[in-house]
Amino acid sequence: MTQGYERPDVPALNELGGLLQHLGEELAVWRRRSLKAEAELGEARARGGMLAGPEMLQARQRVVELEVESQAFRARIDAARDRLALLASRLRFLQQDADEGAA
């Protein structure tokens, strides 16, 4: 009779073993995710506490583009200011020359 006897708890123990293995795999996945999130949070804190979501990254990129554009405009304004100063000095010279010629 002992040959045909199977412990009644073996199927339950096998099922429990499978569940524990699955639980261990799930915990490993969650651990990797939490470690990744903690690393991202550490990086964000190092950058001043700002988290970089998609909208934040787009906004930062747009700010960089606008700053570059602003620098280009400043350079153009400075060049135009220099040309205007040169034209003003030429105009003064021509006025002085015309005044001396009329006198």
Image (cartoon, rainbow, N blue to C red):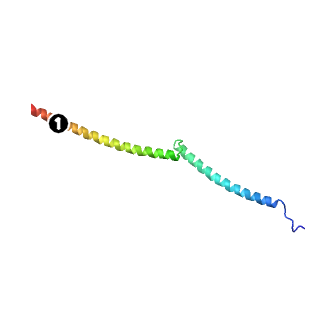
Residue sitting at 41 percent across and 46 percent down?
Answer: 65
Residue drawn where x is 33% and y is 43% of the image? 75
Task: Tell whether 37 sits left or right of 55.
Answer: right
Residue located 67% across and 54% down the image: 26
- Residue type at tag 1: Phe
- Give the vertical position of 64 relative to 26 (above or below): above
In the image, farthest residue toward the right:
1
**Residue placed most toward the observer, 62 or 24:** 62
- Find residue 76 and report its horizontal and vertical position in percent: 31, 43
Q: Position of residue 9 (x, y in %)?
A: 82, 59
Q: Quadrant of residue 28?
A: bottom right
- Rendered view: 99 above or below 28: above
Residue placed most toward the observer, 5 or 28 = 5
Quadrant containing the C terminus in the rendered view = top left
The structure residue drawn at horizontal position 25% and vertical position 41%, both measured from the top left corner, is 83
- Local packing at callout 1 (Cα closer than 10 Å; few below 14, some 14-19, many 20+) is few
Image coords of residue 16 (percent x, y): 76, 57
Give the x, y percent position of residue 73: 34, 42
Q: Quadrant of residue 29?
A: bottom right
Quadrant of res 100: top left
Residue position for label 1:
93
Count of numbered badges drawn on the protein:
1
Helix, strand or loop status at disc 1:
helix
**Left or right, 52 with reference to 83:** right
**Quarter of the image containing the N terminus?**
bottom right
